Image (spheres, rainbow, N blue to C red):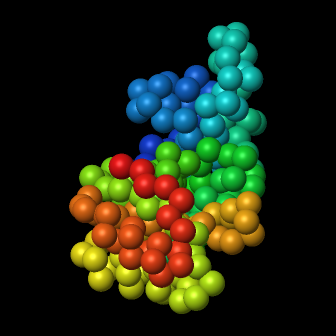
Amino acid sequence: MKVKNCMQKDLIIVGKDALLQEAGALMKKHSIRHLPVVEDEQLVGFITESDLRQYSFPSQEKDIHVHEVMVLNPITVNLNASIEKAARLIHDYKIGGLPVLDKKKLVGIITAIDLLSAFINMMGLLRDSSRLDVLVGKVGGVEDVTRIIKAHGCEIISVATESHSSRRKLYCFRLEKGELDKAIDALEDAGHKVVSVVD
């Protein structure tokens, strides 16, 4: 999935010469925590709720303009980048959101919440489903596990992996809700170990 598929497109922006209290009022009114600073459709900075908190005293706010506080050259992401890339940037830089650019033009914002929602949808976590955790046997590999699951009428929504103490990879299959007993027996008979089943 690409950033453009889950970014926020209806942007609230502020000019660099606006006062901090105006920026704060915009954030409060629209229930947002990130505000792009734009001049002539070009992103010139980024201001966040935490930036404003440092100047939350009314006597200071009146005299401070957005350009004095905003982040210059903020970390950005291209609208055609993968959501994995956006997630890595947010994680690595410990930030809550990214301006999304098309060439140099601001076209959206993607936040950690947007990314979480996208990953939840991709993993099928909100669908009526079950999770089958399988340690793959030495013969056949994950392809064999997939074949057995499908042969027993189970529909795979998504697959994730994680390391296991046995140094083998644990495969977590998210499946459409259905009867799993026969598939589990067949997996065990084929030398794969079903570690857990979560409904």
Residue extending furthest toward the front: 189
Q: Position of residue 22 (x, y in %)?
A: 54, 27
| Left or right of 150 on screen, residue 118 | right
- Specify whether 101 is left or right of 147: right
Residue drawn 74% across the image and 23% down it: 54
Q: Position of residue 1 (x, y in %)?
A: 45, 71
The one of 125 and 38 positioned closer to us in this rendering: 125
Direction from residue 174 to residue 95 in the image, left or right: right
**Is residue 188 among the parts visible in the rendering?**
yes
Can residue 109 be seen? no
Query: Residue 5 lies in what quarter of the image?
Result: bottom left
Residue under the point 45% across and 43% down = 12
Residues 37 and 81: in front is: 81
Residue 108: give x, y in percent of width and height. 47, 57
Residue reaching furthest to the bottom: 140
The number of numbered badges drawn on the structure is: 0
Where is residue 75 shown, x and y percent of the image?
Answer: 69, 58
